[in-house]
């Protein structure tokens, strides 16, 4: 397993969304900063809190030109229920292959039941990793305020 570090290209990852507008990452985020969130599942209270926080920050993210995408191993009906419950306005993928996704990104996988541990990436407009946050359990994840501050800093200090 190889962890993705700053400056590395984010690998090609195909995300199945509930609305059928599947995403090809990182290409679907190109041209602006992006956030890719892997969440453990709709059952995880920490993941729900993180997704809610990113939804609450969505207006600020839009103003800053930051796109957010989340995904998990949950099936399509479970993901649809989660989107409705949390009123998520950003794309949420379903039915991710945990082991394949982990092999590409370095995310940790829970062995039984199989799911991706919380993992987050901030990508630059070219699809390169700016920061990666890997968790091996329930806690330790990206928060919207940190992402906004980082992107604002990078925009102010890069030509």
Image (tube, rainbow, N blue to C red):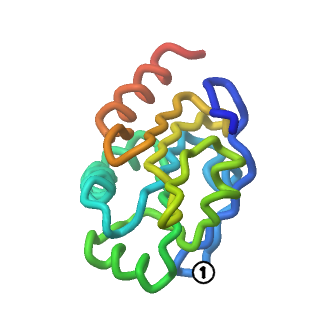
Pick the quarter of the image with the N terminus.
Answer: top right
Q: Nearer the viewer, residue 109 or 65?
A: 109
User: Residue 52 is drawn in which quadrant?
Assistant: bottom left
User: Would you say 100 lies left or right of 34 here?
Assistant: right
User: Would you say 40 lies left or right of 122 here?
Assistant: left
Q: Nearer the viewer, residue 157 or 10?
A: 10
Does residue 157 sit above or below 145 in this rendering? above
Residue that sits furthest to the bottom in the current view? 77
Secondary structure category for the residue under label 1: loop
State the image coordinates of residue 101 (x, y, percent, origin top left): 65, 55
User: Residue 22 is drawn in which quadrant?
Assistant: bottom right
Does residue 48 sit above or below 11 in this rendering? below
Q: Which residue is mark 1?
A: 20
Does residue 67 sit above or below 124 in this rendering? below
State the image coordinates of residue 152 (x, y, percent, origin top left): 40, 26
Q: Nearer the viewer, residue 54 or 119?
A: 119
Residue at 72% in and 35% down? 9
State the image coordinates of residue 113 (x, y, percent, origin top left): 48, 66
């Amino acid at each position: 397993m190889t962890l993705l570090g700053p400056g590395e290209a984010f690998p090609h990852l195909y995300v199945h969304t509930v609305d059928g507008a599947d995403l090809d990452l990182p290409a679907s985020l190109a041209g602006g900063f992006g956030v890719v969130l892997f969440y453990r599942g709709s059952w995880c209270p920490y993941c729900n809190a993180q997704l809610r926080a990113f939804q609450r920050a969505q207006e600020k993210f839009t103003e800053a030109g930051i796109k957010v995408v989340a995904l998990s191993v949950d099936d399509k009906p479970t993901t649809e229920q989660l989107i409705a419950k949390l009123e998520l306005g950003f794309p949420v993928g379903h039915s991710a292959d945990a082991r394949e996704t982990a092999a590409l990104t370095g995310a940790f996988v829970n062995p039984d039941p199989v799911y991706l541990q919380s993992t987050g990436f901030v990508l630059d407009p070219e699809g390169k990793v700016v920061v990666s946050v890997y968790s091996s359990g329930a806690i330790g994840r990206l928060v919207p305020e940190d992402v906004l501050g980082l992107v604002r800093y990078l925009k102010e200090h890069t030509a």
